[in-house]
Amino acid sequence: MRKVMVMGVGAQGSTIAKRLNEEPGIEEIICADYDLKAVQEMEKTLSKARGVKVNARNLNEIIKAAQGVELIVNGLVPDFNVNVMEAALKVGADYQDMASGPVSDMGFVEAVKRVFGYDERFRKQGITALINTGSAPGLANVIARQSVDQLDSCDSIEIFVYDGIWSKKFIPFWWSPETAFGDMAARPIIYDHGEFKRYSPFHDSRDEDFLGLGKRRMVDHEHEEPVTMGLLSEKVLKGVKYVNFRYGGPGLDIAEYFYKMGLLSDEEIDVGGIKIVPMDIISKLTPPAPKYPDEIQAVLDEGMYSEEGAFLIRVEGVKDDRKTRIDSYVNAPGLTEAFKKAGITHESYLTGQAAFLFTRMLVNGKITTRGVFPPEVLAADEREYYFKEAAKLDITIDQYIHTRLHAE
């Protein structure tokens, strides 16, 4: 594969572009974004990059920029997925994205089903659309499938992400604050015995006891994994009955306070005769996540109080007539280490590098399945390749299997 386009060169897209620049088989990386500064930064720092300003709302602009490419990596928010997928079909390129929802024009489950609905068109053209690639969703899905394959039957899959960073500079989220607040104000989805159930935001608050860290507060959180895994339960996950995603960290507490005060609402309110949207105010005033090296360095220079985290994929089921639980912990560089290694944040490192490994598989022909599918569909040899490549980037998985000595 000689020519790739990265559509959207924010935190994750820029990380993928940088890693593609090191791939010997890649001759040109088209870095497309509406942010002219972002594409100019890519052109300035990457020898194979060519920057193009593109409005992703305009399908024809995407198609024009993508002429001759063999893969389009979509690093934009999910509202643009349909346009970028249509462009990939038009130019006959493989496609990769980071997430399927939420989107503004339909529900979360419906958005995932809409993307799945492109499967036949991609199959007919003999091209691949690998969706939901990153750390979670993405790496988490690969780990979940790996654990499920070790069982005879699967009862539940739970994914836990805890992100705790306290710096002297106030940074509540290390990704888009607008996205973070929106996700937390959304009603989480749980796949439960064939149904997708919605609950209130911050549902089921309880402490999870993480190995080596201790108990940390977690709540149900809207995410792709319960949806894709629920839809693919019988196909690849041995009939899993329950799938959930839970999140925790200091940003959670801030978001919950704002939510209870009505500050995460999208509904207009009257303040002294002026109509305002509370979420707009919060999004405007919340400091953005540091993106460029000088911004990250400024946070580190000001000082850190502490940083901790946990990324756990728990799969439960039956093996040889015994109830079995498989806990898989992901190890990856924290903020300070990630910046030393790659000049980026821990969030960008784990998500961007995890996403790039899927890109590497596509550009090097390691994925041969055609159509639209998420990472839990990958075959055993493809998953093994992924884990080996991840380990080279200091992204490793420790797996613990819990079972009883007697059958039940």
Image: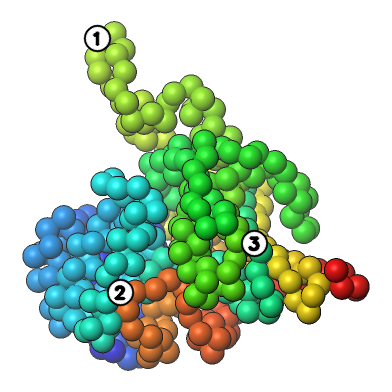
Q: In the drawing, what numbered circle is on residue 273?
A: 1
Q: Which residue is mark 2?
A: 119
Give the side of residue 337 with respect to residue 403, left or right.
left
Q: Position of residue 381 (x, y in %)?
A: 54, 89
Say if mark 1 contacts mark 2, CB within 8 Å: no
Q: Residue at x 50, y 53 (%)?
A: 195
Q: In terms of sequence position, does the residue under pointer 1 or pointer 3 come before the other?
A: 3
Q: CA distance from mark 1 to mark 3?
A: 51 Å
- Amino acid at circle 2: Asp
- Residue 332 in sight in this render: no
**Dot in front, 1 or 2:** 2
Q: Residue at x 71, y 68 (%)?
A: 317
- Mark 3 secondary-structure assignment: strand
The quarter holding residue 149 reads bottom right
Q: Residues within 10 Å of mark 3 (few under 14, many from 20)?
A: many
Q: Position of residue 294 (x, y in %)?
A: 42, 54
Q: Which residue is mark 3?
A: 156
